[in-house]
Amino acid sequence: MVIDLRKCTGCNACTIACIAENHLPAGVVYRPVMEEELGTYPNVSMRSTPRPCMQCETAPCVPVCPVHATWIRPDGIVDMDYDQCIGCRYCMTACPYHARTFDFGYNYTTGTPEPNQPYERVPNFEYGKRWEQRRGRSPTGNVRKCHFCSHKLDAGMLPSCVTSCIGYATYFGDANDPDSLVAELISRGNKIRLKEEMGTRPRVYYLI
């Protein structure tokens, strides 16, 4: 994934598209947009940085899982098995990007006159399986994370964050294909990767 920070407007359309696509409950966000102030007054500006899971080649979250509930797929996506996950949250501690979120089972309508509406119990289909949104059942009580909409990738489609970007700031493709757009973009000199010095080898590149 390549994200052009010069084009990102901070509209959060990718965040909302991700929540809608994956039926994420309250408190679970896979793709937050971080706001950063640059410069010194009066010469200041804002920079918006979407932060999905980095899908690291050397993912620190994988070896710390005591039940092997997370692993790296052949295509590079860091995968999870909610039924295997015991919710210990070791992976959350290990991730230097804070890209994992615990699902406490919160609802958007909690505390309202009519809580737990039917639309909040709609199942999601992450990792190619059907998951029911019910207390006491996975993924409630599990750690959750961005997976580049792997269920859409497996069907030949793009992640929802890519197709919803109004500024055309997010690109997705095969970096190993020299003819692909993402390979061309990351071959330029204006790219960075977050916390690259930690040796995680993230698969998300930023253009600055």
Image (tube, rainbow, N blue to C red):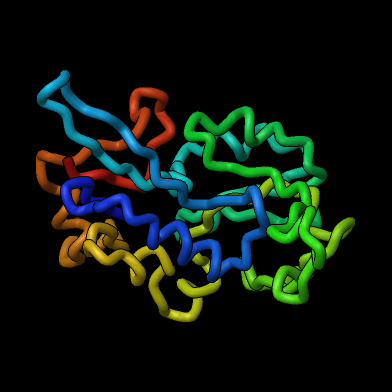
- In the image, taking residue 65 as reference, residue 195 lies left or right, namely left
Q: Position of residue 181 (x, y in %)?
A: 18, 64
Q: Position of residue 9 (x, y in %)?
A: 25, 52
Q: Which residue is at the far right?
A: 136
Q: Which residue is at the far top?
A: 40
Above/below status of 194 relative to 165: above
- Would residue 79 be seen by someone viewing this image from the given angle? yes
- Would residue 139 be seen by someone viewing this image from the given angle? no
Q: Which residue is at the far bottom?
A: 155
- In the image, taking residue 24 as reference, residue 167 lies left or right, namely left
Q: Position of residue 83 (x, y in %)?
A: 80, 57
- Please report the residue visible at 40 percent of the width from the left and 60 percent of the height from the top: 14
- Please report the residue visible at 46 percent of the width from the left and 54 percent of the height from the top: 76
Q: Where's the N terminus, which quadrant?
A: bottom left
Badge count: 0
Above/below status of 173 relative to 199: below
- Please report the residue visible at 39 percent of the width from the left and 39 percent of the height from the top: 34
Above/below status of 31 relative to 43: below
- In the image, taking residue 92 as reference, residue 99 lies left or right, namely left
Nearest the eye: 51 or 84: 51
Q: Position of residue 97 (x, y in %)?
A: 48, 34
Q: Where's the C terminus, which quadrant?
A: top left
Location of residue 24 (image quadrant) = bottom right
- Please report the residue visible at 38 percent of the width from the left and 37 percent of the height from the top: 201
Nearest the eye: 88 or 71: 88
Above/below status of 78 relative to 195: below
